Amino acid sequence: GHADLSRRFPKLEIPLLSFREYLNLKCQLDFKPMKLWQMPREEARRILNAVNVIAEFREHRRAGIRPFFLEHSYQAKLLATLEKSPFHDVPYFVPQIQESHIGLMNAVIGHLATSPIPTVNIDSLCRDWAVGKEKVYALLKTLEHIGVIHIVGYLGTVKVGKGAKLLLADPSLYDCLGGNTGTAREAYVVTMLKAAGHQV
């Protein structure tokens, strides 16, 4: 199960940057973590005078979530990171990976990037890719474990059933893959809440 996977293997994902960390690296704007609604007025004024917050936030979500945003070719590096996961990371966790399993994972990622409703139909995946349900669940849970997707289900559910949302764990992938803006925003909120230790 997924809990067993988390106990046996540490998370492999590279930590993603918060907006505060992004501003610190890009604009040398240093301030402590705080809740927006508790930000002192003088601190808010200092930040607003230093940068165009809305423009920087858009750039952060679009191409500034990973530390390599300071280098050139953000999207190329992001895609290389994404392409590596099904081929190199997933086989470490799921035994007997076949080419069809890699194709299924890439199809799921492509679907999630562009779909306005970020869900998958498990029965259709099984039928279209000739893969059993348990293998599909194992692949999706592993993609979550290695930081490619977030599975947002109902509290207490074990499997990716009806109603569960699957969101790309790196929200900048939506822009990189020509994805849905609304889903990208939703993914950003989920990613940042999870990074802050909240259960979503």
Image (cartoon, rainbow, N blue to C red):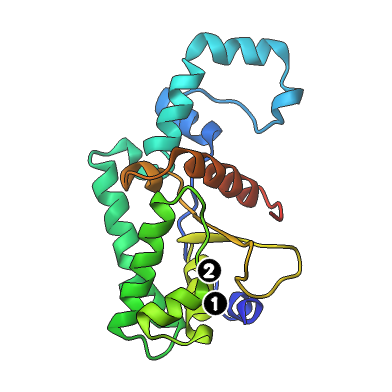
Q: Residue at x 42, y 81 (%)?
A: 127
x 52%, y 39%: residue: 185
From what the image shows, is residue 40 above or below residue 127? above
Q: Which residue is mark 1?
A: 9
Is residue 180 or residue 14 the one in the foreground?
Answer: 180
- Tell me whether the residue at label 2 lies in contact with that at label 1, contact meaning CB atoms closer than 8 angstroms: yes
The percent position of residue 135, horizontal first and vertical second, equals: 48, 84
Q: Position of residue 11 (x, y in %)?
A: 53, 67
Query: Against 185, is 48 above or below?
Result: above
Left or right for 152, reference 143: right
For the residues labelled 2 and 1, the Cα–Cα distance comes to 9 Å
Task: Specify the quadrant of the image occupied by residue 165.
Answer: bottom right
Taking the image as shown, residue 62 lies to the left or right of residue 116, namely: left
Instruction: Measuring from the top left, give residue 22's x and y in whole percent.
Output: 47, 33
Can residue 17 be spotted in the picture? no
Q: Report whether 96 appears left or right of 118.
A: left
Q: State which tag comes first along the sequence, 2 or 1.
A: 1
Q: Which residue position is annotated with label 2?
A: 145
Picture layout, residue 116 above or below residue 157: above
Quarter placement of the N terminus: bottom right
Residue 141 is situated, as x and y percent measured from the top left of the image, at 54, 73
Callout 2: SS: helix
Residue type beneath disc 1? Phe
Q: Quadrant of the C terminus?
A: bottom right
Residue type marked 2: His
Considering only vertical position in the picture, is 176 above or below 4?
above
